[in-house]
Image: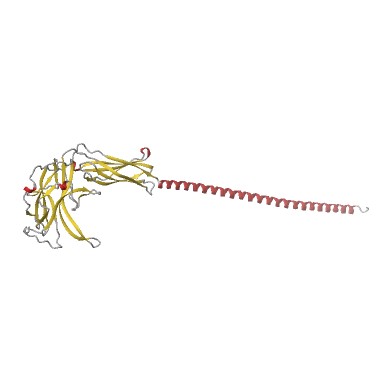
Amino acid sequence: MRLPAVTAVGVVLIGLAPPAAVAAPTPTPAAPTPAASAAPSPATTASPPAKSPLTWGVTPSSPKGPDGRDSLRYKLDPGASVTDYVAVTNHSAGPVTLTVYASDAFTTAQGGFDLLAGREKPVDVGAWVRLTTRTLTVPATSRMDLPFTLTVPANATPGDHTGGIVASLAATGTDAQGNQVSVDHRVGTRVYLRVTGELRPALTLEDLRVRHRGSYNPITGGELTATAMLRNTGNVRLGGQPTLRATGPFGLAARTATGGPLPEILPGNAVRVSVRLSGVPPLFRLTAITTVTPVTVDGQVIDPPPVSVADSRAVWAVPWSQLLLVALTIGGGWGLVTLRRRRRRRTARDLAQAVAAAREQGRVEAAEDLADGSADGARNRQNVRTAGAASDATRSSEDSSGDPER
């Protein structure tokens, strides 16, 4: 059951008459609604049609009707008592029979305000409330102002005690599997009681866990998420403001994130806290400090004031994406250097092969030239010898023709 939110200021009423001395509640016509302009007779007790919607409300009241309070707030000494009223209003077109009772409140793990189930027996302020009746039949579009007495035990502990007074209607419904189930529809108003004495505001962080999640983008950094149970170990209602601070080795690259404000936490109860910090540089080993600054509810001033609570965890933040980028950079550079070296070696090898081929070609050509030169020399020598012989023969012939007598 969810009850309305509350605001500040309590009402101190001490030593009023017990419920036995208070007259039984009588129906009072409620303000007209669009569905009904006049209140039916209180004698009308027939149940409304099955399809007729039932709507009712519970608010703080007085003997003459609702007085504008949004909750029932008291500050009492141990052993003191107070008598007050709640108005149960039926906004429906037919009468409704409700079960009225008080119960203890608790804070859900998600930070909601709830009361114990109807079958659970209260042990705190819900057990200190006495109503004049437990079953109440309210005529259509009517209101009944129901008195009750709150008596604080003499051994009650100082601090805040929270509960609620509800008007309940049990009905039979069907679940998702088609089975019939009993559904308890409850509407109520909150009860805030502060028992006088020493106040001890205190919060405690439990089961703190910090997780780091790296980013695929090596530039943006990773993300830290801190989760914990924040328990109210004191005796007053408190809210809180969580923060998460992360630092690298030697305090490098400090980052801080502030979470959303926490709802009120009743004494002895706990809520789950989660704070997320983005853009955290992955410096291998990080120190994450989670701090919750207590906040008093309704602007109350508490003496002594509550103090902040903090806890820290060390978490590994390996820069995988950055290491991969470095590896790729080194690998790319090494590959480029290797490629250049291979190209230079290939160029040098090709050049050496070209030089060797040129040299071989030169040797071949030189040998051919030498061979050609030897053949030409032999031919020249033969020609010279042939020419010399011819010259000798010519001279001999000339000599013979020039001396006939010989």
Residue 269: image x %, image y %? 23, 46
Q: Residue at x 85, y 53 (%)?
A: 393
Task: Tell how many labels.
Answer: 0
Residue 298: image x %, image y %? 18, 43
Please indicate whether residue 336 sits to the left or right of residue 270 in the image.
Answer: right
Residue 44: image x %, image y %? 7, 60
User: Is residue 230 or residue 329 the one in the foreground?
Assistant: 230
User: Is residue 320 or residue 149 the one in the foreground?
Assistant: 149
User: Is residue 311 or residue 24 the one in the foreground?
Assistant: 24
Q: Is residue 352 above or below residue 183?
A: above
Q: Which image quadrant is residue 186 in?
A: bottom left
Q: Residue at x 41, y 47 (%)?
A: 320
Please indicate whether residue 304 sits to the left or right of residue 372 in the image.
Answer: left
Residue 107: image x %, image y %? 22, 48
Q: Residue at x 17, y 38 (%)?
A: 197
In the displayed orientation, state which residue is furthest to the front.
Answer: 155
Q: Which image quadrant is residue 256 in?
A: top left
In the displayed orientation, state which residue is furthest to the top.
Answer: 304
Please indicate whether residue 379 sits to the left or right of residue 270 in the image.
Answer: right
User: Is residue 182 or residue 309 the one in the foreground?
Assistant: 182
Colour mapping used in the image: secondary structure
Please indicate whether residue 30 sits to the left or right of residue 114 in the image.
Answer: left
